[in-house]
């Protein structure tokens, strides 16, 4: 199991892999408090690009430790621009490279690439709820 620490505002959270169901619950909670970044994250993680395992992996884009950490922060009302992820570690504490899903939306410095999500996955009307505009 992979783990990752992430900071956002006053919060430090630990994301753990294999928590896809909880990731979706946290995103819904974040949408419930109208965190405008939450629907953007949902649009990306729910897209077939992220729900279809590839490159020989069995997981989907929402089952990594990274989205679990980000979803926790979103549910605490933190926005992408205030988040920073550390590098994930395995059960022995060794650093792990990001998978092909996470490498697309996390910058090498651990900041979130919100522009990538918006440009690639929020392309049509109706993807975001009407309270979310930017
Ligand atoms: Zn990943």
Image (cartoon, rainbow, N blue to C red):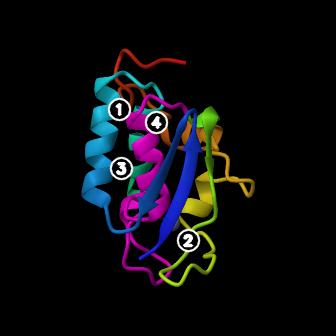
- Measured Cα–Cα span from mark 1 to mark 2: 25 Å
Q: Is residue 32 above or below residue 10?
A: above
Identify the residue at horizontal 41%, vertical 45% (top origin): 71
Region in magenta: 50-79
Which residue ends up furthest to the right in the rendered image? 109
Q: Residue at x 74, y 58 (%)?
A: 108
How would you rate the neighbour count of disc 1 (Cα within 10 Å): few for under 14, some for 14-19, many for 20 or more? many
Rendering quarter of residue 53: bottom left
Instruction: Please state, as top left, top right, bottom left or bottom right, where the N terminus lies in the image.
Output: bottom left
Q: Which residue is mark 1?
A: 30
Question: Does mark 3's beta carbon lie closer than 8 Å to ligand 1?
Answer: no
Residue for badge 3: 46
- Give the Cα separation between the discs numbered 1 and 4: 11 Å
Foreground: disc 1 or disc 4:
1
Earlier residue among tags 2 and 4: 4
Say which label, 4 or 3, has the lower sequence index: 4
Mark 4 sits on what residue? 40
């Amino acid at each position: 199991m992979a783990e990752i620490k992430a900071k956002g505002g006053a919060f430090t959270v630990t994301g753990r892999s294999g928590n896809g169901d909880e990731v979706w619950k946290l995103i819904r909670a974040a949408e419930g408090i109208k965190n405008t970044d939450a629907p953007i994250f949902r649009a990306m993680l729910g897209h077939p690009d992220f729900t279809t395992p590839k490159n020989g992996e069995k997981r989907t884009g929402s089952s990594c430790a990274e989205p679990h950490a980000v979803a926790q922060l979103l549910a605490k009302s933190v926005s992408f621009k205030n988040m920073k992820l550390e590098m994930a570690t395995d059960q022995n504490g060794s650093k792990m490279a990001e998978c092909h899903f996470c490498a697309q939306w996390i910058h090498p410095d651990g900041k979130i690439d919100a522009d990538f999500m918006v440009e690639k996955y929020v392309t049509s009307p109706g993807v975001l709820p009407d309270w979310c505009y930017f």
